[in-house]
Amino acid sequence: MTAKKVKKTLVDEAKLLEHMIEAVKNFDGGKFTKQAQFIQASWARFLDDRRLTNVFLAQADDNEVVEDLSQEMQQVELYIKATDASAEYTETWEKFLTCERDILKYLVEMGRDGKSGP
């Protein structure tokens, strides 16, 4: 596959993120604690940052796309190493982060396929 297909994937994800952002923003969190309301707003901002990144990358040079995704994959790899997936946690972040890393790895490989770039 090519970086063109990676960019199409990024555009598709941006569209999905738009719907997720609306769902988070429109969810009635009025009965939430202040902390939970903060988390709700934080998720909306996080998802919007991700969406904006996808929009930017979809318009970037092919090599920039591959490089950015490679750097993000390296950052996720560091998070995986730092995550303690013990039974004390209610969520197993290591599994989530490993999945995220695998998605990034797949996109990087798609973007590099057929290119002589980085």
Image (cartoon, rainbow, N blue to C red):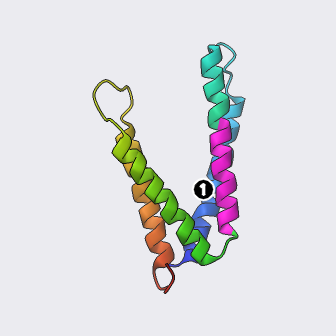
Q: Position of residue 72 (x, y in %)?
A: 51, 57
Observer able to see residue 20: no
Q: Position of residue 18 (x, y in %)?
A: 69, 47
- Using the image as rendered, state which of residue 28 and residue 40 is in the foreground: 40
Amino acid type indicated by mark 1: Glu
Q: Residue at x 61, y 18 (%)?
A: 35
Q: Residue at x 31, y 35 (%)?
A: 85
**Magenta span of residues:** 44-58
**In the picture shown, does residue 19 fall above or below 43?**
below
Is residue 3 found left or right of 92 in the rendered image? right
Q: Position of residue 47 (x, y in %)?
A: 63, 44
Q: How many marks?
A: 1
Residue under circle 1? 13
Is residue 34 shown in magenta?
A: no
Residue farthest left in this picture:
87
**In the picture shown, does residue 15 fall above or below 56?**
above
